[in-house]
Image (spheres, grey):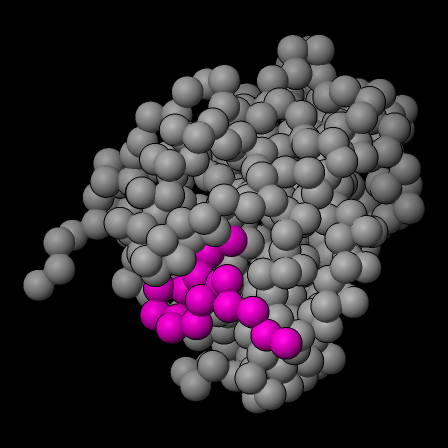
Amino acid sequence: MSAPLRTQDFDFTLPEDLIAQAPARPRDAARMLLVRPDAMAEAGVRDLPSLLRPGDVMVVNDTRVIPARLHAQRGAARIEVMLNRSEGGGIWHALVRNARRLRAGDVIAIEGAEGCTATVMADPQDGAVMLDFGPDQAALAAALEKAGEVPLPPYIVRPDGPRTEDAADYQTIFAERPGAVAAPTASLHFTPALLDALAARGVGRATVTLHVGAGTFLPMRAEDPRAHRLHAEWGEVTEQAAAAINAARAAGGRIVAIGTTALRLLESAVDQVGRVHPFRGLTDIYLLPGHRFRSADLLMTNFHLPRSTLFMLVCAFAGTARMKDAYAHAIAQRYRFYSYGDSSLLERADDRATLLERTA
């Protein structure tokens, strides 16, 4: 019988000065740690074309981060709102600081956006609330651009609020469909030059959408990871994307998930024999050690927080012992961690192919 999962088993000590406060410049100058079944190797993000094979397909997330952090007032009470997920028709699921001050029927006014208000649809539950901004989507979008802030993670320290450059730095080259409140950070490393080199190598690309929610910032408090729950996020795998992924797999190509968001969505859409199907809707899939991955062969991802669902995900994908060794190596070699940090390329634990294999 396998040992029970414990949150404390996914803890590690990270020096605070390794938490990246700004991205590498240019973006593809970041370092990349290759994690194979039998070894680790040092590389850079710019080496990615030589590490992938013609016929491989990268799966990228085209979600676009919106300025989702808002400051609001209900009477004299000040409230911080983090939009989390659009429910359509101007209704948003949101996480609210000082939520205890709100009740169903309350109207809050968004600071900095005159005339923009939202009605509380029901009493808050666990800090979450449904807000009705009204049906005018264009007016809400304009209000967000005027009054909203880039929802940087709390470990990126900005005492005076986001910097001007964060609006571009915290947006990926693939960003097309607005709706995320956190960036799919593995994709922050890509540049036009890197994409050109990948295309020249014969590496394909399939695009999916997962609107990353504010729940990605929430700490895990349960000592049994299985007691934790993820907020549902909206995602889509189109027929075109599913067909491209399945065709690549049938032809012997590998599927390379660019980021944990792409991987979570693929695992939401894959069947028992590894075929990816079109998908559109909410997913709260939670990937822990013991999960059998069927959709992707490789995972490109940044370095994650201790005791987090994402560190558990990479342990599930590449093996817990391997990932603990990899993170210890990354800390010793002073890799930069988290959203603006360096990258890693992980081989699936049950994959016999090697990352460094070359093809003519």
At 50% from the left and 73% from the top, the residue drawn is 295
Question: Residue 303 or 141: which is nearer the viewer?
Answer: 303
Give the extent of the magenta segment.
345-360
Instruction: Provide residue 174's location: percent of width, then percent of height.
Output: 77, 54
Dividing the image into 4 quarters, which one contains the N terminus? Answer: bottom left
Vertical side of 237 occupied by 110: above or below: above
**Residue 185 visible in image:** yes
User: Number of callouts in the render?
Assistant: 0
Question: Residue 16 or 102: which is nearer the viewer?
Answer: 16
Vertical side of 116 occupied by 231: above or below: below
Instruction: Provide residue 234's location: percent of width, then percent of height.
Output: 62, 59
Instruction: Provide residue 109's location: percent of width, then percent of height.
Output: 77, 25
Instruction: Provide residue 300's location: percent of width, then percent of height.
Output: 55, 54
Q: Find out whether residue 56 is within the magenta segment.
A: no
In the image, taking residue 200 as reference, residue 305 lies left or right, namely left
The furthest residue to the front: 360
At 45% from the left and 48% from the top, the residue drawn is 41
**Residue 315 visible in image:** no
The furthest residue to the bottom: 250
In the image, taking residue 315 as reference, residue 25 lies left or right, namely right
